[in-house]
Structure formats: C-alpha cells, structure tokens
Amino acid sequence: MEAISNEPKKSLRTLFETANTQRHNLDSIPNPSSSIYQSHLQTAIRAFQQCQDLTERLSIFSPNETEDDITSNNLRYLLTNHYLGDLLLKDSLSPRKHVLQRSRVAFERYLKLLDSYEMLSKSDSKLYQRYLSSPDDFSLLSQSDPTARRNTKIARYKQEQELKLKLEYLARVPLALQHDDAASREIHLAETQLCAHNTFHALDIIGQELKIISLMPQTSPAPQPEDLAEDYRQRNGRPNKDDNYFDRLDPPISQLLNTGKAGPILSKDGRPLKPFTLLDSRQRVQNGVFRPDHALPTMTIDEYLAEEKKRGGMVDGGGQTSTGPQDVNEDDLDRADAETMKAREWDEFVESNPKGSGNTLNRG
C-alpha cells in the first residue's frame, strides 16, 4: 500500500493522451480476435475508465454550467464515455450480453452529458428523446415505411459525410492557427458532434443484438467430468466413490490385503489358490502393439493352394488341356474298331430317323 501511495499521480491530461494513444495503436493490430489485440484492448479500456473516474472526482463538468463555461482544453474529455463505449463493443472475451450492456451504459452517459450542456443538434435531440422513451425498442430507421427508411439512411449518410469533411478541414488548419483557442474549440465541437452521430448508430445496433440474444434458448452450464462419471455409475447400478469405489482397474494394495486377495497364486505343491490368467510372452505382446487394426494373412497363396489340395477342395483337370485333341495310339486296334462301330451306328440312326420325323404334334 505504501508503494501505491508514494507513486506520483498522473494528471487528467496525461491519462487521456495515454488512453487515446493506446486506442489508436489498436488499428495497427490486424486481427481483433487475437490475444494480443484483446490484451491491448483491455489496457485501453482501463485507461479510459481511470480518466472517467478522475473526471468525476475533479468535477470537470457540472450540470449548472453551459457549453460556454467549458474551457477549450476540457472539451476533449467529453469524449471519454464515447471512446469507452466503442472499445467495450470490441471485447470478445467477456459474455456478449454483458459487453453490450456495459457499452450501452457508457454511450448513455455520453449523450446525457451532451444533453445537459445542450450540445446536441435538433435532430440528435429528437433522437435522444425517442431513445429515452423506449431504449429497448429504439431504432434509427422506420420498420414499416420503406420510403421513410430510405430517406433516413440518405439523410444520416449525408450528415456523417459533412461532419467528417468539416473535421478533416479543421485538422488541416496550419499549426499557428491550432494554438488559437477558437480554432481548437471548433475542432473539439465538430468531433463531439460526429461522435454523437456514431453513438446513436451504436445504440441502434446494440438494441438489435440484445433482442437476438433474448430470443436465443438459455444454455445450461456444461456438466463437469465428475458429474458425468457419477451419473454413469448411477445409471448402471454401480457404487459411488464413497462406497469403496475406485476408478483404477487394479484396486490398491490395502484393499487387496483387507479382502484376502493378496498372496501367492500357487501353493507349494503346485495347486492354484485363486483364479489367474496366463499371459503371452512380453515380446509378442509388445510386437502386437504397433500393428494394423485389420487381420493380416497367415500363409502365402501357394501354401493355401497346397492345403486345399490336401483337403480335397480342388479338382485337377479342366481348362484347355482337357478339351484339346488327344493323342491316338495307331497300334491299339480294339479301340479303333470300337470307334468305327460307334460311327456306323450313328450313321444308321441318322438315316432311319431323318430330321423332323419325331415332330408329329404340329402336323395337320
């Protein structure tokens, strides 16, 4: 605590310039969802929150004052809540609904401060009154009339372009004129009007997104692994952990000693004292660890064919060798006579039975 109290206090101007520099540095980080971007974003958010707290403690702005009572150097601090609300919208680490609500509060403080000083334009003042009447249903565009919706889009786009051109023109003012109090004041007022224009657009988007979130089904918190294991044991009728239940396949030694399962497997004369399982050699088990998940062949094709021949599952013959011309032994007279008699009998059968003689059913 002593180190904090002895630390020199920063002025509001130093805090605001540091926070604004951190806000501009975010543009150099390409990925808004990266951890680096979110870390720098949280740093910038904390810096603007410190500016807001210090502004309230110093009572820079008072409801009894008017716009003319604010000094030109203090006009920049009006934008603190707007910058804070814009940065909060980019937070992707916190729950989205919480982010939108925090950003909406910051934007509301900004508009309330401008309204108290009567710094809102006539169109923005009407929009602010509409917003106060129904913040949840606030919308810049008409939902029923397409023509009015189109005209509103065109009018707001032109207004935004005019404010940007005015701010760019004032930013190109020579350095000698920038030290002029009137020129500096006009720059800050133009930036304030542009931020008010963007604030209403942000509130419209926040309202739409909150409506979408409210329509989403409420998700229950994810169950913890211990709860899932407990439910599984209850569904399967297994004991709980309190009932001497252990997740390990092999119970601890103390439990084995208590239940009498410890001790030798065989007696001195070789009789088994309790059930046991014979395991294969360690090398064979080790070889079976890194192997394909499908069954590998246990024999070659030649071995399989030889085994089939032994079992009588294969018949020799067939193919071209069985249907080709056979070698005739000219010295075998008995076989030659048998072939001659067979040919004579076939010729006699063909002569006595001409073609079509057996078809007697279709004759008239």
Image (tube, helix red, strand yellow):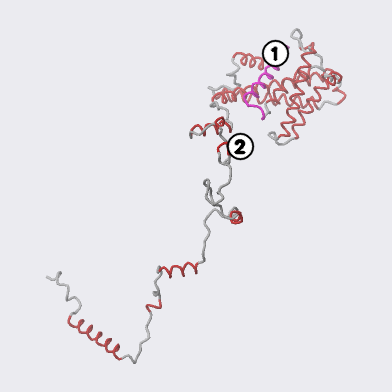
Q: Nearer the viewer, residue 67 or 157?
A: 67
Image location (x, y in percent) of residue 87: 71, 26
In the rendered view, tell whether residue 307 sits above or below residue 150.
below
Of labels 2 and 1, the one closer to you: 2
Checking the image for residue 115, the label placed there is 1
Give the Cα separation between the discs numbered 2 and 1. Answer: 77 Å
Residue at left offset 84%, top offset 23% = 178
Q: Is residue 80 left or right of residue 247?
A: right
Q: Secondary structure at mark 1?
A: helix
Q: Secondary structure at mark 2?
A: helix
Image location (x, y in percent) of residue 121: 69, 16
Task: Tell me the amino acid under the disc marked 2.
Answer: Ser
Image location (x, y in percent) of residue 197: 68, 21
- The residue range painted magenta reads 92-121
Q: Is residue 128 left or right of residue 326?
A: right
Say few, some or many: other residues with alpha carbon within 10 Å of mark 1 (under 14 / 14 to 19 / 20 or more): some
Furthest residue in direction top, as rendered? 64
How many marks do you count on the picture? 2
Checking the image for residue 308, the label placed there is none
The picture quadrant where one finds residue 22 is: top right
Q: Nearer the viewer, residue 183 or 23?
A: 23
Task: Tell me the amino acid under the disc marked 1.
Answer: Asp
- Residue holding disc 2: 254
Q: Nearer the viewer, residue 176 or 140?
A: 140
Image location (x, y in percent) of residue 106: 69, 19
Q: Nearer the viewer, residue 276 or 188?
A: 276
Q: Quadrant of the N terminus?
A: top right
Q: Give yes or no for residue 107 being in the magenta stretch.
A: yes
Furthest residue in direction left, as rendered? 364
Q: Magenta part mainly helix, strand or loop?
A: helix
Residues marked 2 and 1 touching at CB (< 8 Å): no
One can see residue 194 in this view: no
